[in-house]
Amino acid sequence: MNDSIPVTRTTDHGTAKLMPDVDRDRAWLLTVDGAPQSYVDLDEPAHLEFEYTRRLGHVLDVVAEPGRALDVVHLGGGALTLPRYVAVTRPGSRQDVVEADRGLLELVAEHLPLPHGANVALHAADARDWLERAPAASADVLLADVFSGSRVPAHLTSVAYVREVGRVLRDGGVYLANLPDAAPFAFLRSQLATLAGVFEELVLIAEPGVLRGRRFGNAVLVAGRRPVDVAALTRLTAADAFPARVEHGAGLREFIGGARPVRDEDAVPSPEPPDGAFGIG
């Protein structure tokens, strides 16, 4: 049993709280302003509790042969759940984490230490500013999970931003993004259209109920210049406790429809989630 004491701290961008999971020793939930952000099990860093993180983990599993070290950039830090996952599933990987909230990074580093030997550099910076200064062709994977409050910031949704992503990725690199939306999916469709201007290969992963318009939820977007192993990804996501659908090819082009790429001057944040969409009891 986990009998640790919750930790609450006012950080640069909100009130962060680390709450112990009573059912798992040394496991913690991070919330910011009451919204769940990350879940970490210090004894089992490959454990991914949230559905969307498992889907991102599945993509990380199939982007290269198992165990191969990768250079990974994480935009958005949270409690460093996915950097921990990469560190133990792909030993020797070099990772950069870019998080605008320096206080949050300090809280996590203090209370939730990274696995021994993890090669993870932490950067307190705006995601797009850091990306624009990053060397070209320096990353195998670029993963965006950035939220200001409960919304993806507008400046991380435009063609100019996506071009920077494409510049930093190597030729065979892959971009992953966690984006929230609900029917009629104006935001999600525009993001896919924006990515299509830079990347030839697109994949969308989401719970069937979200895609059918039944509820607000997370979607994982995957973009690259080379094909993703969609068959393997479909098997992994279908085997989850909460299965997801994988859309690509003609079905995804139909989903995008007439959506247009987003220019900086037209960019807007992701939609405000309805009350209780991501809350905890």
Image: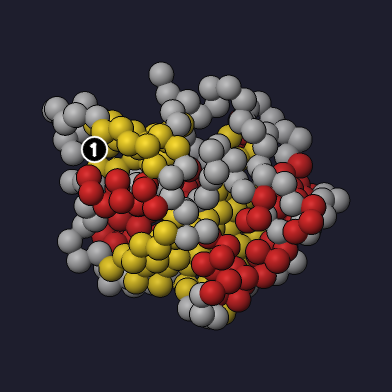
Local crowd at mark 1 within 10 Å, few (<14), some, or many (≥20)?
many
Q: Residue at x 60, y 76 (%)?
A: 167
Q: Furthest residue to the top?
A: 281
Most foreground residue, 157 or 190: 157
In the image, residue 139 above or below residue 202: below
Q: Which colour style is shown?
A: secondary structure
Q: Is residue 162 visible?
A: yes
At label 1, which amino acid type do we have?
Ala
Q: Secondary structure at mark 1?
A: strand
Q: Quadrant of residue 194?
A: bottom right
Q: Circle 1 sits on which residue?
A: 27
Tally of numbered discs:
1
Most foreground residue, 9 or 152: 9
Q: Quadrant of residue 165?
A: bottom right
Q: Furthest residue to the right?
A: 258
Q: Residue at x 72, y 46 (%)?
A: 268
In the image, residue 275 above or below residue 184: above
Q: Residue at x 64, y 33 (%)?
A: 272
Q: Position of residue 225 (x, y in %)?
A: 62, 72
Q: Position of residue 36 (x, y in %)?
A: 42, 34
Left or right placement of residue 26 versus residue 240 in this view: left
Most foreground residue, 131 or 67: 131
Quarter that holds the N terminus:
top left
Q: Quadrant of residue 128?
A: bottom right
Q: Position of residue 136 (x, y in %)?
A: 55, 80
Q: Position of residue 137 (x, y in %)?
A: 53, 80
Left or right placement of residue 227 versus residue 119 in this view: right
Q: Is residue 250 visible?
A: no
Q: Residue at x 41, y 19 (%)?
A: 281
